[in-house]
Amino acid sequence: MLASCVRAELVKLRRDPIWIVFVALPGISSIIGCANYQANLGVITPGWTSLWTQQTLFVCYFFLPALLGAGCSFLWRQEHQGSNWNELMVQPVPIRDLVIAKFCVGALMSFAAFASILVFYVGSGVVLGVPGAFPVAQVTGYVTLGALGSLAVVAIQLGISMVVRNFAVPVGIALAGGVSGLIATVVGLGNVWPYSLLQTGMNSNELVDLSAAGIAQIVVLSVAYSLLAIAWSCRWLARRDIVATM
């Protein structure tokens, strides 16, 4: 049943241009990062690490949280229109499968964004002629941890978008979450606050602890926040009923 729910969610998105945004927006961030990298070559050390920090600085704090918020709002948009909520409530499908299916598709959106970030990063580095060997292990770790941390944001934003029928409000909350993640990272709570985990994993400002203990903390809390948010969404949705429509 879960697989059928996932396929149904993908069918709804098949012809929608939202996928383009998840690929294109990291490209805009990459262009900004390249410009910053080139402009600051007299200050920073030329190399792949410096290019990574410049390219991911904006995307992990501002673009990506808002993008994930928009994606999660989009996943609930159809259910909030007309009498679709009532149709959802009477479907012979376990609530758990409905919620997890949306989480799986939201995770797929996030992974598409991270794949785009990686492609633009490598491509721009080649074009700019960045010196030094490409840090395969380091970048793989950053992308993996960042993607894992993003799952907590996806799970939380899906819960918010499920409750809030307005499309824009959850996006604003996600953007505020990204800013709060930056603040949490600066004060040393980057491995704890849910909206900091994707930023901490990407290590765009090199202010976080990515020792073995720090990495373990990111992994455990990313999974824990995701499971808690999914469980809360399932419980909330199980208590809902059909509503009167005009």
Image (cartoon, rainbow, N blue to C red):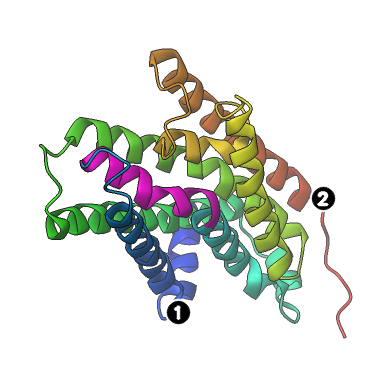
**Left or right for 129, reference 139:** left
The chief SS type of the magenta part is: helix
> Could you tell me residue 60's position as x and y percent?
47, 49
* Circle nearer the N terminus (2, 1): 1
| Above/below status of 165 relative to 181 | below
Q: Residue at x 35, y 52 (%)?
A: 55
Asked if the residues shown at circle 2 and circle 1 are in contact, with their CB atoms under 8 angstroms apart, the answer is no
Q: Nearer the viewer, residue 159 or 243?
A: 159
Q: Nearer the viewer, mark 2 or mark 1?
A: 1
Q: Residue at x 43, y 59 (%)?
A: 109
Q: Residue 96, can we see it?
A: no
> Could you tell me residue 233's position as x and y percent?
70, 47
Mark 2 element type: loop
> Could you tell me residue 106's position as x and y percent?
50, 56
The single residue placed furthest to the top in the displayed view is 213
Q: Residue 67, can we see it?
A: yes
Q: How many marks?
A: 2
Q: Nearer the viewer, residue 126 or 16?
A: 126
Task: Give the residues drawn in magenta, as a range.
Answer: 47-62
Q: Residues within 10 Å of mark 1 (few under 14, many from 20)?
A: few
**Left or right for 13, reference 129:** right
Q: Which residue is mark 1?
A: 16
